[in-house]
Image: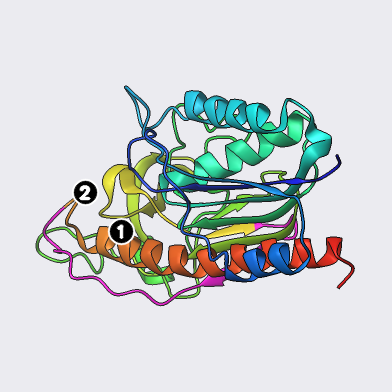
Amino acid sequence: MARDIDIVIESSASNSFRPFSTSGIDLTGYNRLVKVGNLSRKLVNIRAGSVGRRDSSDLSGNINSLAVEVDKAIGADMSRVGALVLYGTSNGSGQTLGLAKELQKRGAPRATYIGVGDLTLMPFGRQPPVPGIGDLQPFNAPRISAFRAINPFASLKSFGLPPNVDEDDFPKISDPGVQGDILENYYTRAGNRMRFYSQSPAGQNTWWWTSTQSFGEVHGEIDGGGWKNIVLTTTSDGSELARGPGSVDEGHHDSLCGQATQTMNFKAGDALRLFVAKQLGI
């Protein structure tokens, strides 16, 4: 049979990779169509964490394991893949992109839906890089006012909180090259800051991206490739004194991930429903 197995894989933030559970996708419309059409379809529905056994930054083992799960489900026959729905937040965003690229490499059909929420952009690059995607380092520098250019310590508070970038200024990465009918990137502009570095990717003695999150993680847009970049408004009850977990920027990140997960559960479910409706000629 052709295109009779639908695949849904949600990659959650920093949870342990196993055990697998089921995604939070909204299956109401999909299940109704399958029942009304008396269709013989199989749904593979997985939620996986994105922390490996030893190192959450190395996603290669997780991506390969998920690709193996897909191979098992379809009997290593990519012609049986129907709807392919992949989405995730935070660390799981990188896992989602890496899995999309791996399945693409193995001959999977064009994805039905790919969604990422607060993709973890690393100011000095992620090590090791996400397999098939890269190090998620922004290619653009923050905009600098003339006043700040000559006074790199302007706007610093007494406890050294890096200054926010302008609301309409945000980091960008290049299109990672994954293919999908719907490509959505959810992010928040709150929590992106800049810091004066003696050596940065933009050159010596320049401003570059940072935040109060671990490793200075920031969030922004995917440039080109048909991506729809969607800004969500976030709040934070994190501390301006903290760095890493509990910090003000971590709070914005958590707020975004919660909102994006809820939205993508619905949007992914709708894309799944529309795929089956098209199969029925509706």
Residue 126's quadrant in the figure? top left
> Looking at the magenta stretch, what is its main secondary structure?
loop
Q: Nearer the viewer, residue 189 or 52?
A: 52
For the point 53% across and 48% down, the residue is 138
Distance Cα–Cα, label 2 vs label 1: 23 Å
Residue 263 at x, y = what percent? 50, 70
Residue 281 at x, y = what percent? 90, 68
Q: Is residue 32 visible?
A: yes
Tell me the kind of residue under disc 2. Answer: Gly
Q: Is residue 137 visible?
A: no
> Is 53 colored magenta in this rendering?
no
> Is 234 colored magenta in this rendering?
yes
Q: Nearer the viewer, residue 69 or 241?
A: 69
- Report whether 20 appears left or right of 249: right
Q: To which residue does mark 1 refer?
A: 152
Q: Which type of secondary structure does the marked residue at label 1 adopt? A: loop
Tell me the kind of residue under disc 1. Answer: Pro
Residue 237 at x, y = what percent? 18, 70
The range drawn in magenta is 223-242
Q: Which type of secondary structure does the marked residue at label 2 adopt? A: loop
Q: To which residue does mark 2 refer?
A: 244
